Amino acid sequence: MAQSDPLSGLTDDPALAKVLRQGLEQMATGAAGPELRDLATDVLSGRGDIRKLMMSSAYEEVVSARSADFMQWYGGLSEAEREEHAARGEAYLDEVRAEDVRRPARPAPRPEPIDDEDWPPTTYLR
């Protein structure tokens, strides 16, 4: 049976969920360091819940340090710069939403054929 999405429950917005997944996939490449790579890999694989992992002792130090770095960067922005970054983020979400609307839904995969060589062929004409 298919595994449930490890990011379900974080947002009802499919575009935001997609952007979150993209961010985690980028972190899983190691772009943000080995500790966050491990956290992202654990979340994407379903081995851990993102909320619990981010608050766990294993990741507490790196998450706190990265949060402090972000707050320092954000605190140094002017109001106009903050608004510009917010507008760029909203524009990107709008692009993702529009892309999802334009893309047709994927058809369901065909089931694998059943190996039934031990059974005689079904015939309705006898």
Image: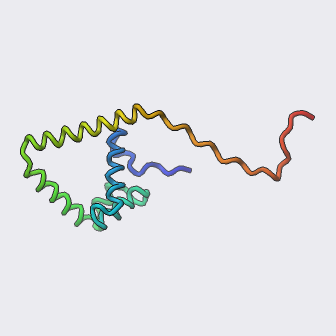
Q: Position of residue 99 (x, y in %)?
A: 37, 35
In the displayed structure, 70 sits above or below 87; it is below
The residue at the point 23 percent across, 41 percent down is: 89
Q: Residue at x 28, y 65 (%)?
A: 33
Residue 18's spot in the image, x, y percent? 36, 44
Q: How many marks?
A: 0
Residue 17: x and y in percent read 35, 44
The residue lying at 34 percent from left, 54 percent from top is: 24
Q: In the picture, residue 82 is in which quadrant? A: top left
Quadrant placement of the C terminus:
top right
- What sort of colour scheme is used for the picture? rainbow
Q: Is residue 24 above or below residue 36?
A: above
- Which residue occupies 51% across, 38% down? 106
Q: Is residue 68 left or right of residue 36?
A: left
Residue 19 percent location from the top left of the image: 32, 45
Q: Hey, which quadrant is residue 64 in on the image?
A: bottom left
